[in-house]
Image (cartoon, helix red, strand yellow):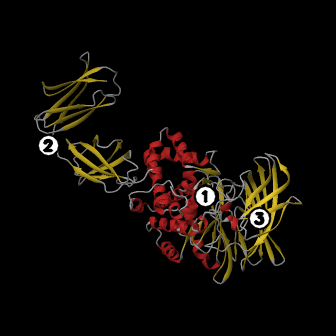
Amino acid sequence: MKLLFLTCLLMFSKVIAQPVTNYIEKVYEIALSEQISHERLMNADNVSASSNNFDVKYYRCEWEVDPAVRFIKGKVTVYFTITSASNTISLDLMSSLVTDSVKQRHTLLNYQHLNNALQINFINTVPAGKLDSVSIFYNGIPATSGFGSFIQSTHAGVPVIWTLSEPYGSRDWWPCKNGLDDKADSIDVYITHPALYKAASNGLLQTETQIGLNTITHWKHRYPIASYLICLAVTNYSVFNNSVQLGNINLPMQTFCYPENLTIFQNNTPLVLNALQFYHNTFGEYPFIKEKYGHVQFGWGGGMEHQTSTFITTPNESLMAHELGHQWFGDKVTCASWQDIWLNEGFATYLASMYMEKAYPATVINNRKAEIVNITSAPGGSVWVDDTTNVNRIFSGRLSYTKGSHLLYMLRWILGDSIFFKGIRQYHKDPKVSYGFATTDDLKRNLELASGKDLTAFFKKWFYGEGYPSYNVEWTQVGSNYAKIKMNQTTSHPSVNFFELPVALKFKNATQEKTVIVDNKTNGEIFYRNIGFIADTVWVDPDYWLITKNNTTQKITDNSGGQNMVQVFPNPVQQQLFVYLKNYTSLYANISLYNSAGQLLYRKLLTVNGSEFIEIPFGHLARGVYFIKAGSGKDVKFVKKIVK
């Protein structure tokens, strides 16, 4: 959920005219809105009071509202399966609302409505596994403390009502199971409202039936849904339709917007259609492919990713891309705890960042750089939320959003595009989490299955650990084609003493450049790489895949004494044998490799520019003893025994 103040609305208005401004600024605004909107909802008494002895299957919600009046009258029928035999269940419902009656089919039931919990008592014990239902009749004025979750307001002088319930606000205006542990399999929503208005909700519009001065609007949604993602909005909406081709499906896109903003919504909606195609092709099928995607305008800044029906204030491109990303990550797969909120917000930030990179490739480097500058603006902080009582910590723009997003960048860098996206798609459709709830371990498990890699160290250091590395790269030009590279690292926080990462190094001179990758696993590790020319500059992580800061490079002149020095390593050898000639006095050198029987296996004549470096492939050779010789012409200056 994202709610912003008027200042943020003005920023969004500017962005519509100039859509390629720094995306990281939008991430800050989104995170700030999360903090604001959840401040009221994270008090100690905001723990779900519903009992855990039943599993919700279906809600039929029948609501009566008038946008000019802050009031709701409702009948909510809950279908459920009892998981352990009981004669009672409890739902969440604020005590400020009045419960008129509770029925089990046509039979009145006893109930107690205290301390924001509605306890329903059955006449007989309901056995485990039984599918049953109850209907709750209620009415009242939803709570108005804080920002609220049921809003009655105006736009251009016209009344409007909308709801916004993440994470525990659903109970403010309807009886439900309000925690992050149970999704209804499907819902029907019937909204009775004055006939001059339109009503929006989740799923597909079924009917609009006028009865006297009122209209009953029926919406149907046939996918699992968390209670906080169920919504309604009523005002004098202008409605228009688009569609987008997703594979063989022509998906409807339906927009409900204020009449005074019709033009801007019509002009900008094609942008989210582009993002729909991109996400569908990249991360897997749009999760609600049998229904629709939609936008509903509401009165606070930013947006809220209600399932199939995103509430949005202004159709800013990056904001629309962020909220759309939640349909995959946040709605279909929902984080199972606040400690794992990055599975919602880090993913949505990453998807939007990917979309903006695709739409505006010239901004890639600057945006990634800005993200890393934000992440490394403090030396500590983990993506794992270590204090779930602190709303600012949960919805930290630096950690849950931006660092969470960049963890995905780094996993993509480590695993490669093909394996990374395979693992993400596998996670997204994993039966254990699909249309349900997930933890970070679920993501890790699927990435490991796709890659065959053990990612325990990565998540231990990057998800649970704090801080980031800083590199000092010492390098020496070796001959005309090779570089000797020493990777030194310091870390910003004591929770991690070393980050193992593959690091890209771009070697350059005035006319040439080459990027090589070193898989740095220990501090002070030395690598030799064929760069193909004499370089004068090295850049660390030139495309900003990694979370690092204050990286430095230092060119070291090879001042080793002595002439005609030959180094051969490693010994024993596995795949590659390296031969390093230093301060060689002859213009030419002859390198030869023999087996133990004296047979010549390899020979190379090379021109030596003072020092030179070569690689001899060894992987195809059998285990045994070999001899390498180096000299000038017939003058053998060096003989070394090599073991494989």
Quadrant of the rendered image containing residue 608? top left
Q: Nearer the viewer, residue 411 or 638?
A: 411
Residue type, numbered disc 2 = Asn
Residue 248: horizontal and vertical position, in percent? Answer: 64, 52
Image disc number at residue 113: 3
Q: Residues at badges 1 and 2 in contact (C-beta under 8 Å)?
A: no
* Mark 3 vs mark 1, CA separation in Å: 34 Å
Q: How would you rate the neighbour count of disc 2 (Cα within 10 Å): few for under 14, some for 14-19, many for 20 or more?
A: few
Residue bearing the label numbered 2: 559
Residue type, numbered disc 3 = His
Residue 115: horizontal and vertical position, in percent? Answer: 71, 65
- Residue at 74% over, 59% down: 91
Residue bearing the label numbered 1: 327
Work out whether 46 lies above or below 450: below
Please tell me which of labels 2 and 3 falls first in the chain: 3
Quadrant of the rendered image containing residue 595? top left
Please tell me which of labels 3 and 1 falls first in the chain: 3
- Residue at 53% over, 39% down: 449
Q: Secondary structure at mark 2?
A: loop
Left or right: residue 117 compared with residue 261: right
In the displayed image of the protein, which residue is found farthest to the right? 106
Residue type, numbered disc 1 = Gln
